[in-house]
């Protein structure tokens, strides 16, 4: 196996926020939170506008006055911060991930982004009442005998504007001392300077990158970092001691996909060793039917929805199973050539394809969740938990 | 109403071609014709003086009926309300709300009203007042839809107004060239494709065109040819199957393979075996009928005799 060959990028790249708003809308009830002050302090030239707590209709109206492309909305979150991953129904296997809901939206602009169909708030939104979030975490994580895998990258990218929010540092402060939870930060950016420079214990934090074929990255992933850049950043994070997660999601079927994905897999192992990687997830492209129109409207050039899509058991459009099987078998074989023991799992896939690809299938979501938990135990000394290797 | 007086006018003095107030488009409702033919005009239309005669602000459909009746009766003097010293914007607003109070606009009317409003009002007024009234969401897709409809050929607009083509189909064909759209209209006219099936056909044409990077025109010519029956007419079901097979080659192959696989098992003859929809998930369904306990027993005996390997083979995914 190759040893990590880290080619460093100019450091400025790692400390640059992908989002540089020129306007900050601050909800009146949120204006006293320290996070507001620190974000606004990092944007000395931005216009700051305080608005009354907006309704959905107000948000639409505000989006005509302030372009969502250049406006950040700072708000107080009133609901639960910790949520189960939306895919927890038993139709397809879900890993029972928990989402720490600290923000909404992202400006990377992937054509396939599911958020296009989800969000009725047009603004990239950062919740600023972090004390409420941490208090909720304290209460939830106090439950004895429960282990949590928690991520912040479900309704946003975990790091794309981290140099602006400084959130990663605050999360490391919390999860660094956490005994029964791991934090996974998922990104397509390379805004990792806070992670590299973090002075304290990083705990068991996982930094993950979504990966795809180079052509998909160039055509469909807006201004996400190039694959090589992501992997270079991953190698740097690994050097700093973070575990690295990789996510091939969405896996796409397009002419020449084999060569393209083969290239990405080769790049991974030019930067990382199999042991550096805690898990690799794979999920073939899927989308809610109504996203198709929005996607075509926002990205008229893309043709990613023009394939053999059928209606899945969860109501989402997904590739016909023969196509998924071909994609999975190829990718898993390629990865195994470099890293026979790395833990690979499917995100939202059925028993049949699990069995077909891996020769085994989790009986239910609990079991899949348990497999992932075991990956974490392997590297952790969790209180009261016996370390056990993931198969 | 201030500045409005009731007066007589001749139908010949009305500028029916003027579309400053484009609140009506499409076939005249039979009920309206009957009502006017029986009871006459109960509510006079609202007109305003224009360059080429009186412009119709409100009541285009009533006037069209009267024009039709006048062809038979020769009676062309009618009672109307004439507006004077009222701004174009105010007249537009009144007409919009008067129409909205009594009916829904069809797609062509909605599009024409939106486009006409853009010429009369500021963008801000259109977005804040007119678009919400017309229930047009403030997104580019819906504005683009309206603008496209306004520029469509009369044939296509007639189909839209009649409800034979829906909004989703418009979104798909709005980027097509005029020739492509006219080929589609020919197809609709020839084949009698109805609204929902048309949307499905156009959706598949659009997907195929984008996937294979070819023009919908070429595709249309291709599938049309392949869907002709022996008499040279377009067979709608054949057309749909052709498109599905092209867009879903692997799914189609899987279905054919499944049908062929069943042939290997003669014991299946009295039953109907349905695979899971699109072979997704694992639930196969076996259908059979029976009329009494004897038949039931026979069926159970047949099923009990089936080798389990046969079941595995039948449920194997291709
Ligand atoms: S990075 Fe993630 S959240 Fe951002 S646009 Fe892409 S898919 Fe959406």
Image (spheres, coloured by chain):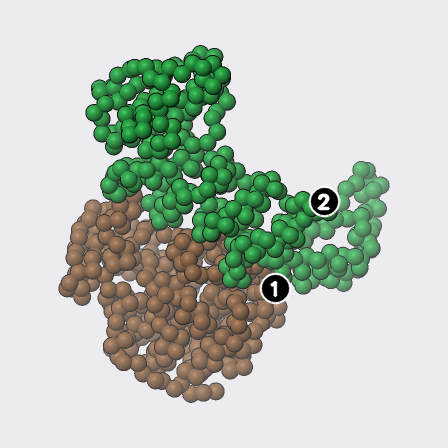
Chain colours: A brown, B green
Residue occupying the point 36% across, 80% down: A232
For residue A322, the mark is 1
Looking at the picture, tell me which residue is in the foreground, B29 or A273.
Answer: B29
For residue B133, the mark is none
Chain at numbered mark 1:
A
Residue A145 locus on image (x, y percent): 42, 64
Question: Taking A278 as reference, is B266 left or right?
Answer: right
Residue A58 locus on image (x, y percent): 26, 44
Q: CA distance from mark 2 to mark 1?
A: 38 Å
> Are the residues under badges 2 and 1 in a single subunit?
no
Comparing marks 2 and 1, which lies closer to the viewer? Answer: 2
Residue occupying the point 40% across, 85% down: A4
Residue occupying the point 38% across, 39% down: B111
Element assignment for label 1? helix
Chain at numbered mark 2:
B
User: Which residue is the site of mark 2?
Assistant: B231
Question: Taking B253 as reference, is B269 left or right?
Answer: right
| Residue A98 shows in this picture | no
Farthest residue, direction top? B39
Looking at the picture, tell me which residue is in the foreground, A206 or A209.
Answer: A209
Residue A136 locus on image (x, y percent): 31, 57
User: Which of the 4 image quadrants contains residue B63?
Assistant: top left
Element assignment for label 2? loop
Question: Taking A14 as reference, is B311 left or right?
Answer: right
Looking at the picture, tell me which residue is in the foreground, A254 or A275.
Answer: A254
Looking at the picture, tell me which residue is in the foreground, B182 or A70.
Answer: B182
Mark 2 and ligand 1: say if the CB distance to the nearest ligand atom is below 8 Å. no
């Amino acid at each position: 196996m190759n040893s990590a060959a880290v080619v460093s990028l100019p450091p400025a790249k790692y400390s640059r926020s992908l989002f540089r708003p020129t306007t900050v809308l601050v909800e009146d009830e949120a204006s006293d939170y320290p996070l507001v002050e620190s974000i606004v302090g990092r944007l000395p030239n931005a216009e700051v506008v305080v608005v009354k707590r907006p309704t959905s209709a107000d948000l639409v109206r505000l989006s005509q006055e302030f372009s969502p492309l250049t406006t950040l909305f700072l708000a107080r979150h009133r609901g639960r911060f910790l949520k189960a991953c939306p895919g927890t129904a038993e139709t397809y296997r879900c890993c029972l991930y928990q989402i720490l809901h600290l923000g909404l939206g992202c400006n990377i602009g992937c054509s396939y982004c599911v958020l296009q169909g989800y969000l009725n708030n047009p603004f990239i939104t950062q919740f600023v009442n972090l004390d409420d979030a941490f208090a909720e975490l304290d209460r939830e994580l106090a439950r004895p005998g429960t282990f949590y895998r928690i991520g912040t990258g479900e309704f946003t990218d975990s790091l794309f504007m981290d140099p602006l929010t400084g959130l990663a540092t605050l999360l490391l402060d919390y999860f660094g001392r956490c005994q029964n939870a791991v934090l996974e930060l998922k990104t397509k950016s390379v805004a990792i300077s806070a992670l590299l420079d973090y002075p304290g214990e990083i705990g068991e934090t996982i930094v993950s990158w979504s990966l795809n074929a180079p052509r998909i990255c160039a055509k469909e992933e807006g201004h996400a970092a190039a694959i090589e850049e992501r992997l270079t950043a991953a190698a740097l994070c690994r050097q700093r001691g973070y575990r690295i997660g990789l996510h091939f999601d969405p896996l796409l079927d397009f002419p020449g996909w084999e060569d393209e994905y083969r290239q990405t897999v080769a790049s991974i192992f030019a930067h990382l060793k199999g042991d550096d990687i805690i898990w690799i997830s794979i999920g073939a492209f899927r989308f809610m039917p109504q996203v198709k129109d929005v996607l075509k409207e926002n990205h008229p050039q893309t043709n990613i929805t023009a394939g053999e899509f059928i209606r899945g058991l969860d109501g989402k459009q997904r590739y016909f199973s023969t196509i998924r099987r071909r994609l999975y078998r190829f990718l898993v074989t390629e990865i195994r050539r470099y890293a026979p023991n790395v833990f690979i799992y499917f995100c939202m896939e059925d028993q049949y394809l699990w069995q077909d690809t891996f020769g085994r299938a989790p009986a239910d979501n609990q079991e899949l969740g348990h497999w992932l938990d075991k990956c974490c135990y392997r590297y952790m000394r969790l209180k009261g938990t016996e370390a056990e290797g993931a198969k | 109403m201030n500045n409005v007086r009731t007066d007589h006018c001749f139908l010949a003095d009305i500028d029916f071609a003027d579309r400053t107030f484009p609140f009506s488009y499409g076939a005249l409702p039979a009920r309206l014709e009957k009502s006017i033919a029986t009871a006459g005009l109960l509510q006079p239309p609202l007109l305003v003086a224009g360059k080429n005669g009186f412009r119709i602000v409100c009541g285009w459909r009533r006037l069209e009926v009267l024009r039709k009746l006048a062809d038979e009766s020769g009676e062309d003097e009618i009672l109307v309300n004439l507006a004077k010293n009222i701004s174009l914007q105010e007249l537009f607003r009144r007409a919009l709300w008067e129409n909205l109070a009594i009916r829904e606009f069809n797609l062509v009317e909605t599009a024409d009203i939106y486009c006409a409003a853009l010429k009369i009002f500021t963008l801000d007024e259109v977005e804040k007042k007119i678009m919400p009234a017309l229930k047009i969401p403030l997104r580019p897709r819906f504005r683009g839809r309206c603008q496209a409809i306004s520029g469509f050929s009369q044939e296509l607009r007639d189909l839209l107004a009649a409800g034979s083509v829906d909004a989703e189909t418009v979104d798909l064909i709005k980027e097509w060239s005029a020739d492509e759209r006219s080929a589609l209209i020919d197809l609709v006219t020839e084949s009698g494709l109805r609204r929902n099936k048309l949307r499905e056909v156009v959706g598949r044409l659009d997907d195929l065109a984008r996937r294979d990077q070819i023009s919908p025109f070429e595709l249309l010519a291709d599938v049309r040819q392949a869907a002709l029956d022996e008499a040279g007419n377009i067979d709608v079901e054949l057309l749909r199957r052709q498109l599905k097979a092209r867009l879903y080659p692997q799914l189609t192959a899987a279905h054919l393979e499944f049908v062929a696989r069943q042939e290997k098992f003669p014991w299946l003859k009295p039953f109907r075996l349905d695979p899971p929809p699109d072979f997704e998930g694992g639930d196969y369904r076996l259908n059979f009928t029976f009329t009494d306990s004897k038949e039931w027993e026979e069926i159970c005996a047949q099923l009990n005799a089936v080798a389990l390997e046969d079941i595995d083979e039948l449920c194997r995914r291709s």
